[in-house]
Image (spheres, grey):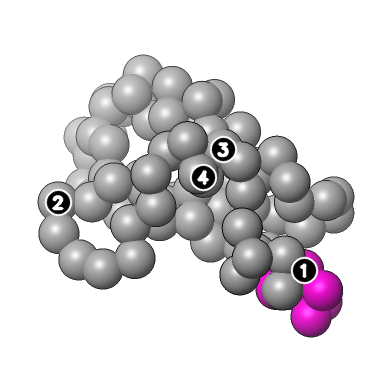
Amino acid sequence: MEEARAAVAAGVDAIGLLGHMPSGPGIIEDNLVQKIASDTPPPISTFLLTSRETGHDIADHVEYCGTTTVQIVRHIEPGE
C-alpha cells in the first residue's frame, strides 16, 4: 500500500499489480491487489498481471481484484 501511495504521489499514470504466477518475484496476494486497486484514485489505471488461462478465470480474477486493466502473461487458446 505504501509503495502504491508513493507512486501516486509521484504522479504515475498506472500501477502494475502482479498476481499469482508459477514462479518469480514480486507476486502480490489477490486481497492486497484488491485493496491497492480500490485505494488508487482515478484517473490512475491499475493493471492486473494474471497467469490464468481461460476467459472465465481471467474475468473472475479481474472482477475480484477490481483493477481497471488486465495483462495476460501466459499463452491462452484463441477461442478464449
Residue that appears at 23% across and 51% down: 21
Q: Position of residue 79 (x, y in %)?
A: 28, 26
Q: Please determine whether, in this image, residue 23 is positioned above or below residue 77.
A: below
Instruction: Determine contact: label 3, label 2, CB under 8 Å.
Output: no
Spatial separation of the CA atoms under disc 4 and disc 3: 4 Å
Q: Earlier in the sequence, mark 4 or mark 2?
A: 2
Work out whether residue 80 or residue 3 is closer to the camera in this orientation and state it: 3
Start-end of magenta stretch: 7-11
Q: Earlier in the sequence, mark 4 or mark 1?
A: 1
Instruction: Mark yes or no: residue 59 visible.
Output: no
Work out whether residue 19 or residue 79 is closer to the camera in this orientation and state it: 19
Q: Earlier in the sequence, mark 1 or mark 3?
A: 1
Instruction: Indicate which disc residue 33 carries.
Output: 4
Instruction: Determine contact: label 4, label 1, CB under 8 Å.
Output: no
Q: Amino acid at mark 3?
A: Gln
Spatial separation of the CA atoms under disc 4 and disc 1: 15 Å
Q: Please determine whether, in this image, residue 35 is positioned above or below residue 63.
A: below
Spatial separation of the CA atoms under disc 2 and disc 1: 29 Å
What element does badge 1 sit on?
helix
- Answer with the quarter of the image where residue 44 lies: bottom right
Q: Earlier in the sequence, mark 3 or mark 2?
A: 2
Q: Amino acid at mark 2?
A: Pro
Q: Amino acid at mark 4?
A: Val
Label 2 crowd (10 A; few <14 / some 14-19 / many >=20): few
Instruction: Determine contact: label 4, label 3, CB under 8 Å.
Output: yes
Q: Relative to 16, is 12 on the left or the right?
A: right
Q: Which residue is mark 2?
A: 22
